[in-house]
């Protein structure tokens, strides 16, 4: 979370998005992934809608993406498509 919070701070301080938070950074990162066309976000009120719209008002820099990539590369878990677990192609 420290990396995501630091990236959010960079986005805010650079003037790219004054209200950017960790959720916006995570959404932007996922949306910028080549194989992703959209993300499904749950909202409970108008504030959540406005918060999620902010995700589309900025871009991540190469260095910000690389910082997040470095964290993602450390993840542990099954290799491959997450749906393969559901299909039974990969043992849990």
Image (cartoon, rainbow, N blue to C red):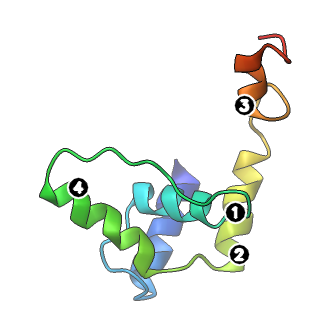
Q: Are marks 4 and 1 in contact (CB under 8 Å)?
A: no
What residue is rendered at 46% in x and 87% in y?
A: 14
Q: Is residue 12 above or below residue 68?
A: below
Vertical placement of 1 versus 27: above or below?
A: above
Nearer the observer: mark 2 or 4; the answer is 4
- Disc marking residue 82: 3
Residue that numbered label 1 is attached to: 67
Mark sitting earlier along the chain (4/1) = 4
Mark 3 or 2 closer to N-term? Answer: 2
Give neighbour class at mark 1: few <14, some 14-19, many 20+ (Cα, 10 Å): some
Location of residue 61 by image quarter:
bottom right
- Judge whether residue 71 can be spotted in this image: yes
Nearer to the camera, 42 or 87: 87
- Is 2 placed left or right of 35 in the picture? left
The residue shown at (71%, 78%) is 62
Residue 13: percent from left, percent from top = 41, 82
* Residue closer to the observer: 60 or 84: 84
In front: mark 4 or mark 3?
3
| Circle 4 crowding by C-alpha within 10 Å: few under 14, some 14–19, many from 20 | few
- Which residue is the site of mark 2? 63
Q: CA distance from mark 4 to mark 3?
A: 27 Å
Compare marks 4 and 3 and give the one earlier in the sequence.
Answer: 4
Alpha-carbon neighbours of circle 3 within 10 Å: few (<14), some, or many (≥20)? few
Residue 85 higher or lower than 91, as above or below: below
Q: Please, which residue is most extreme toward the left here?
A: 46
Closer to viewer: mark 4 or mark 1:
4
Q: Which residue is mark 4?
A: 48
CA gap between label 1 and label 2 equals: 6 Å
Count neighbours of disc 2 (C-alpha within 10 A) and say few if under 14, some if 14 to 19, many if 20 or more: few
Outermost residue, front side:
87
Lateral position of residue 43 relative to residue 21, left or right: left
């Amino acid at each position: 979370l420290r990396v995501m919070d630091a990236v959010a701070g960079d986005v805010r301080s650079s003037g790219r998005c004054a209200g950017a938070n960790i959720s916006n950074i995570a959404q932007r990162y996922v949306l910028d992934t080549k194989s992703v066309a959209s993300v499904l976000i749950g909202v409970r009120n108008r504030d959540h809608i406005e918060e999620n719209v902010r995700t589309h008002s900025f871009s991540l820099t190469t260095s910000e993406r690389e910082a997040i990539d470095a964290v993602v590369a450390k993840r542990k878990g099954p290799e491959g498509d997450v749906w393969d677990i559901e299909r039974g192609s990969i043992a849990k």
